[in-house]
C-alpha cells in the first residue's frame, strides 16, 4: 500500500528527484516572460517571504531594455536568437542606437595608442621556442587585459609588486620587487667568498653572515659546512666529499637489494607511496629518475636507523637539500629542469650529499630535543605516535597562551565617568572590551593544536610555505644554534600569531581548520620570511631565558 501511494505521489509530482531544472539569477535572467513569472513565484514560495510585483516587473523591463543587440546577426548565436526573437523584438531602438554611439566613441578613443601595450614584432626572435606553464599563461592573459583596460582606469600611485605564479619558481627569492643584485648583495657575496676560500673557515662568522640569508651562488658549499658535512679546513674538503660519497654508494650496494625482503617490504612500500606526493606541483620531483634517487636516500636512511625507521614527512626534508645541490650545476630554473641532462657523476654527487645532509639534520633534531626534554629517547620524534613531536606541539600551545597573556597584560584598563570599562593598548587605541586571544579563541571552538601544528613540527613548516621560502628559512635554521630543534618552536609561534586577525574572523570549527591547513602563503618571498624570523627572534629573546616560560 505504501509502495502504491509512493508511485502515485511521483506521478502527480512535476519535479522528479535528480532531474535538471532551469536555474535563473541576476546574471542569467529568463528571456520568456512566462518563465520569469514562474521563477519569481517559485522563489517567493521557497523563501516564504512576500515579493513585491513592482520590483519583479521593473527588473523584467530592465532585462528587456538592456539585451545585447550586437549578437543578433552572428552565426554562432543563430539558434539562440531565433528562440528568443519574441523577446528581442521589444528592444527599445533608441536605447540601442545610443549604446552603439557610445561604444563607437569609446572604441575610437582606445585606438589612439594601441602600440603602448603590445611589443613590436621585430623585437621577437624568429627561432625561439617558448614554453609557458599554465600559471604563466594565466598571468600573461591577465596582463593583456590590464593593458586594454588601462586607458579607462585612473593610474594608481601605489608601488608595483611582481606577481609570483601559483607554482612559484624555486629560484625566485625576491618577492619584494628589489633588483636581482644590489650593491649590498654584491658586498655580502664577496664576504662569503672570502670566508669560504680561507684556509680554515670561521664557522661562527659564517653563521653570523648566513642568518639573514645565504646568496644562491655560495649556498651549496655554505650548507655543507653549516650542517657539519664538510670540515672547516679547505684542504680536507675534497677528500671528505670523495670518502663520504663512496661510503653512501657502498650502503646502496649492501642494503638496497634487501628492499624486497619480507621484513623491509612495509618500509619500502610506504616510501614508494610517499615519493609521488612530494611537491606534486613541481615538475622536477615528478621525474622518474628523481623519484628513484629519493627512494634510495629514504630507504638507506631507514635501514641505518632501525629504532625509528621511515616516518611519513621525512620525504619532504630531502627536497631543500636536493634543490640546493642541484642548483650548483644548473644556472636556469630548476623547477622544470630535466635531470637526465646531467652526467651520472653529478647525479651521484647530488644524491650522496643530500643523504648525508638530511642525516645530519635529523640526527641534530633528535639529540638536541633529547637534551632539552628530559625523559625522551633519541628516537622519540620518529617512533610510534611520535611523542617527541607531540611534546613540541604542547610546548607551542603553552607558549602561545603566554604570548597572548603578555599582550593582554600590556593593556591599560580604566573606568569612564559613566562607570564603564575601556581598554587602551600600547598604540593608544581604545576599545570597550579587551581584544580576544588566539589561544582562547581555539578553546572556544574546541580546536586542538595537534590538529594543525603536528604537521608544522613534523615537516618544519614545509607544507605551509613555498619551497623557495623553506630554503630561505633553512639558511637561518642552520645559522641559529639549535635552529631546527629549538628556534623552530618560536618560528611556529610567530607564524601562528601572524594570522591572528584571520583566525579571530573565523567563528566555527570547520572554518578555523580550513584556514590553518590552507594558509595563503603562495606569494611569500624573502621579505615575509625575514619579518617572520625577526618576530621569532624577538619571542625567543623575551621568553627563552625564563625557565618556565611555556609551563603552566
Image (tube, grey):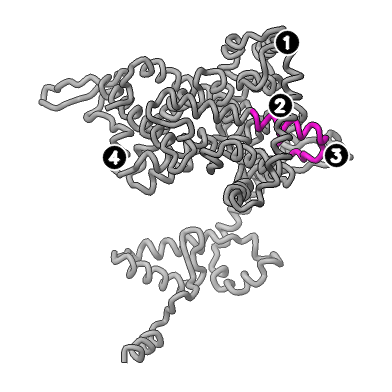
Q: Please check the rendered image and state whether residue 495 is part of the magenta-colored stretch, yes or no.
A: no
- Horizontal relation, residue 486 to residue 319: left or right: left
Find out whether the residues at labels 2 and 1 contact each other: C-beta distance under 8 Å: no
Mark found first going from the N terminus, 3 or 2: 3
Number of labels in the image equals 4
Question: What residue is drawn where x is 50% and y is 72%?
Answer: 32
- The mark closer to the camera, 3 or 2, is 2
- Horizontal relation, residue 473 to residue 193: left or right: left
- The mark closer to the camera, 4 or 2, is 2
- Circle number at residue 197: 1
Judge whether 279 appears above or below 550 on screen: below
Q: Main secondary structure of the magenta part?
A: helix
SS at mark 2 in the image: helix
Find out whether the residues at labels 1 and 4 contact each other: C-beta distance under 8 Å: no
Q: Which residue is mark 2?
A: 244
Find out whether the residues at labels 3 and 2 contact each other: C-beta distance under 8 Å: no
Q: CA distance from mark 2 to mark 1?
A: 21 Å
x and y, in percent, of residue 495 in the image: 45, 30
Mark found first going from the N terminus, 1 or 4: 1
Whether residue 451 can be seen here? yes
x and y, in percent, of residue 193 in the image: 71, 12
Task: Give the magenta part as a residue range.
Answer: 334-356
Q: Which residue is mark 4?
A: 443
- The mark closer to the camera, 2 or 1, is 2
Q: Which residue is mark 3?
A: 128
Question: What residue is drawn where x is 67% and y is 19%?
Answer: 230
Mark 3 nearby-residue class (10 Å; few <14, some 14–19, many ≥20): few
x and y, in percent, of residue 159 in the image: 57, 25
Q: Please check the rendered image and state whether residue 353 is part of the magenta-colored stretch, yes or no.
A: yes
Q: CA distance from mark 3 to mark 4?
A: 59 Å
Amino acid at each position: 500500500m505504501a509502495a502504491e501511494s509512493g508511485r502515485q505521489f511521483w506521478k502527480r509530482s512535476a519535479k522528479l528527484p535528480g532531474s535538471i531544472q532551469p536555474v535563473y539569477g541576476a546574471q542569467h535572467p529568463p528571456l520568456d516572460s512566462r518563465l520569469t513569472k514562474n521563477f519569481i513565484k517559485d522563489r517567493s514560495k521557497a523563501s516564504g517571504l512576500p515579493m513585491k510585483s513592482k520590483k519583479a516587473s521593473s527588473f523584467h523591463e530592465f532585462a528587456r531594455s538592456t539585451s545585447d543587440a550586437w549578437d543578433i546577426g552572428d552565426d554562432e548565436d543563430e539558434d539562440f536568437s531565433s528562440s528568443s526573437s519574441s523577446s528581442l523584438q521589444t528592444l527599445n531602438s533608441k536605447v540601442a542606437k545610443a549604446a552603439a554611439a557610445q561604444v563607437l566613441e569609446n572604441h575610437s578613443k582606445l585606438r589612439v595608442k594601441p602600440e603602448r601595450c603590445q611589443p613590436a614584432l621585430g623585437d621577437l626572435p624568429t627561432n625561439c621556442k617558448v614554453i609557458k606553464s599554465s600559471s604563466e599563461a594565466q598571468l600573461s592573459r591577465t596582463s593583456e587585459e590590464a593593458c586594454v583596460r588601462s586607458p579607462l582606469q585612473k593610474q594608481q600611485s601605489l608601488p608595483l609588486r611582481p606577481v609570483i605564479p601559483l607554482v612559484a619558481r624555486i629560484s625566485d627569492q625576491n618577492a619584494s620587487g628589489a633588483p636581482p643584485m644590489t650593491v649590498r648583495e654584491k658586498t655580502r657575496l664577496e664576504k662569503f667568498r672570502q670566508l669560504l676560500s680561507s684556509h680554515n673557515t670561521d664557522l661562527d662568522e659564517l653563521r653570523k653572515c648566513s642568518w639573514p640569508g645565504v646568496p644562491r651562488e655560495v649556498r651549496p658549499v655554505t650548507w655543507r659546512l653549516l650542517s657539519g658535512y664538510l670540515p672547516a679546513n679547505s684542504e680536507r674538503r675534497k677528500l671528505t666529499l670523495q670518502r663520504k660519497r663512496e661510503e653512501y654508494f657502498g650502503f646502496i650496494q649492501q642494503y638496497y637489494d634487501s628492499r624486497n625482503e619480507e621484513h623491509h617490504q612495509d618500509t619500502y612500500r610506504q616510501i614508494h607511496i610517499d615519493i609521488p606526493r612530494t611537491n606534486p606541483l613541481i615538475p622536477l620531483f615528478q621525474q622518474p629518475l628523481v623519484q628513484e634517487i629519493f627512494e634510495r636516500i629514504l630507504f638507506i636512511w631507514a635501514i641505518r636507523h632501525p629504532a625509528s625507521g621511515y616516518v611519513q614527512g621525512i620525504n619532504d626534508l630531502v627536497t631543500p637539500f636536493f634543490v640546493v645541490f642541484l642548483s650548483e650545476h644548473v644556472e636556469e630554473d630548476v623547477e622544470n629542469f630535466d635531470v637526465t641532462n646531467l652526467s651520472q657523476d653529478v647525479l651521484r654527487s647530488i644524491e650522496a650529499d643530500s643523504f648525508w645532509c638530511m642525516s645530519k639534520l635529523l640526527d641534530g633534531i633528535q639529540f638536541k630535543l633529547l637534551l632539552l626534554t628530559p625523559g625522551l629517547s633519541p628516537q622519540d620524534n620518529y617512533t610510534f605516535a611520535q611523542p617527541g613531536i607531540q611534546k613540541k606541539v604542547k610546548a607551542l600551545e603553552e607558549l602561545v597562551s603566554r604570548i597572548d597573556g603578555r599582550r593582554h597584560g600590556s593593556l591599560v584598563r580604566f573606568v569612564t565617568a559613566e562607570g564603564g570599562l575601556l581598554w587602551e593598548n600600547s598604540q593608544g587605541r581604545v576599545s570597550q572590551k579587551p581584544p580576544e586571544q588566539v589561544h582562547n579563541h581555539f578553546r572556544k571552538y574546541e580546536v586542538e593544536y595537534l590538529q594543525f601544528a603536528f604537521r608544522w613540527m613534523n615537516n618544519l613548516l614545509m607544507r605551509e610555505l613555498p619551497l623557495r621560502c623553506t630554503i630561505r628559512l633553512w639558511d637561518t635554521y642552520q645559522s641559529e644554534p639549535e635552529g631546527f630543534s629549538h628556534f623552530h618552536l618560536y618560528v611556529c609561534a610567530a607564524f601562528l600569531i601572524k594570522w591572528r586577525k584571520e583566525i579571530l574572523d573565523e567563528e566555527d570549527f570547520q572554518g578555523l581548520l580550513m584556514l590553518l591547513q590552507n594558509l595563503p602563503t603562495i606569494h611569500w618571498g624573502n621579505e615575509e620570511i625575514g619579518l617572520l624570523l625577526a618576530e621569532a627572534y624577538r619571542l625567543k629573546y623575551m621568553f627563552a631565558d625564563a625557565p618556565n616560560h611555556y609551563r603552566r
